[in-house]
């Protein structure tokens, strides 16, 4: 029987072939493939056999199921397991982390509310705060003192709206780690709602995968958690978790396209791995790689930002950021270069995105190549020596 041409395949057929590894021929082996640092798949679970098998099983069942209740079963199961993992009573899922932020802020905020926004917060937070006619108050990245000063000022002023604090647990471009434990105490003191974006730490940091909250012993204490599940849990998706179940009830029904049942099944399988021994092993490897690279680069005097996380930001001189990147990538590695408007014009940077699939040898090779590139551009030319003056008689003056 001849194989169907690509144009004759349904979307589900293409997805099945993709998960089965048949959508495209396997690429030729690339000996330097390990030196790719652009993938945002921190625990390397997107290609895990258990995650792929769960997605294929859900996809096959989805094609035969007519009941909406049955189609929602993997989504409800994922929300239940996420709530237990986060030690919070209520979780809602979304097609993406950005959609989770937008829909949650739209339901939460009212005109006149005052929102203290970390300067490194996701752009969707700033956008939705303005659309909701709340009052934004920008605060320095990962600064407890900055948040406290604004809380004190706002508490002394006559106001009608509520106080909200919104920030990332780990900033996406600077790897700054927020002090969630201290901010939780401040939120309780001033009656504010604390909202944390845990996209880059949940599942990928801490012994049990609880991220910054577990490290700082404040699991279950943050009022609202938001984030993308694609970075660590192997498939696209987003979520919002609530300390107060009434906040979830405020989300309008039919507010957005629901999370795909196939993605929900894949994320659920990844969550089981993240919470188990294999997740612990992969997190230890990832954390060790991050520390190894940071130690290499700090020993070479290279300017790093933030603290150890699944990615390592490296500050670059603005005038040579592009040629440095071109020279580095000509040697093999693929690295993301961040420039304005994502980051300040004067502070371009590489964001080295690590995964648990990298090896110590990959990290050593990358560090050596970065060292070579830095020495090439930072080498100071020898100063021209002043020539001795000669008199008209040929005598040296």
Image (cartoon, rainbow, N blue to C red):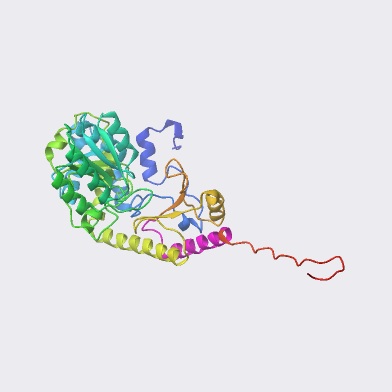
- Going 29% across and 31% down the picture, which residue do you hit? 130
Q: Quadrant of residue 111 in the image?
A: top left
Residue 119: % across, % down: 33, 44
From which residue to which does the magenta span run? 354-377
Q: Quadrant of residue 101 in the image?
A: top left
Q: Main secondary structure of the magenta part?
A: helix
- Going 40% across and 33% down the picture, which residue do you hit? 9
Residue 1: % across, % down: 43, 37
Q: Nearer the viewer, residue 310 or 60?
A: 310
Q: Nearer the viewer, residue 316 or 205?
A: 316
Q: Nearer the viewer, residue 282 or 165?
A: 165
Quadrant, the C terminus: bottom right
- Going 14% across and 42% down the picture, which residue do you hit? 191
In the displayed structure, would residue 314 be above or below residue 157? below
Q: Residue furthest bottom?
A: 395
Q: Nearer the viewer, residue 7 or 387?
A: 387
Q: Residue furthest right?
A: 393
Residue 18: % across, % down: 39, 43
Is 49 within the magenta? no
Report the label total: 0
Is 365 within the magenta? yes
Residue 146: % across, % down: 27, 48
């Amino acid at each position: 029987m001849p194989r169907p041409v690509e144009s004759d395949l349904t979307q589900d057929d293409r997805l099945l072939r993709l998960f089965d590894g048949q959508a495209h021929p396997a690429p030729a082996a690339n000996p330097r493939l390990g030196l790719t640092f652009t993938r945002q798949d921190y625990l390397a679970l997107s290609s895990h056999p258990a995650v792929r098998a769960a997605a294929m099983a859900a996809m096959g069942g989805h094609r035969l199921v007519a009941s909406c209740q049955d189609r929602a079963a993997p989504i409800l199961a994922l929300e239940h397991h996420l709530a237990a993992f986060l030690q919070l009573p209520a979780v809602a899922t979304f097609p993406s982390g950005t959609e989770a932020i937008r829909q949650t802020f739209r339901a939460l905020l009212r005109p006149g509310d005052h929102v203290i926004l970390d300067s490194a917060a996701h752009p969707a937070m700033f956008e939705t705060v303005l659309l909701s006619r709340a009052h934004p108050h920008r605060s320095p990245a990962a600064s407890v003192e900055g948040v406290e000063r604004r809380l004190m000022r706002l508490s002394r002023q006559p106001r009608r709206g509520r106080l909200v604090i919104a920030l990332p647990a780990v900033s996406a471009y600077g790897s700054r780690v927020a002090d969630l434990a201290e901010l939780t105490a401040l939120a309780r003191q001033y009656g504010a709602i604390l909202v944390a974006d845990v996209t880059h730490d949940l599942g990928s940091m801490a012994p049990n995968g609880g991220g910054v909250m577990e490290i700082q012993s404040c699991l279950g204490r943050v009022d609202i958690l938001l984030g993308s599940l694609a970075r660590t849990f192997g498939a696209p998706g987003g979520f919002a978790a609530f300390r107060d179940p009434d906040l979830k009830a405020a989300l309008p029904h039919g507010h957005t396209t629901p999370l795909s049942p196939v993605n929900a099944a894949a994320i659920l399988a990844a969550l089981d791995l993240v919470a188990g021994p294999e997740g612990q092993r992969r997190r230890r490897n990832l954390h060790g790689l991050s520390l190894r690279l940071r130690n290499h680069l700090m020993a070479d005097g290279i300017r790093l930002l933030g603290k150890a996380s699944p990615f390592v930001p490296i500050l670059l001189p603005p005038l040579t950021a592009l040629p440095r990147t071109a020279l580095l990538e000509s040697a093999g590695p693929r690295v993301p270069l961040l420039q304005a408007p994502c980051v300040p014009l004067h502070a371009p940077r590489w964001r080295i995105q690590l995964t648990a699939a990298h090896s110590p040898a990959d990290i050593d090779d990358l560090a050596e190549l970065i060292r070579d590139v830095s020495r090439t551009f930072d080498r100071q030319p020898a100063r021209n020596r002043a020539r001795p003056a000669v008199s008209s008689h040929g005598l040296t003056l």
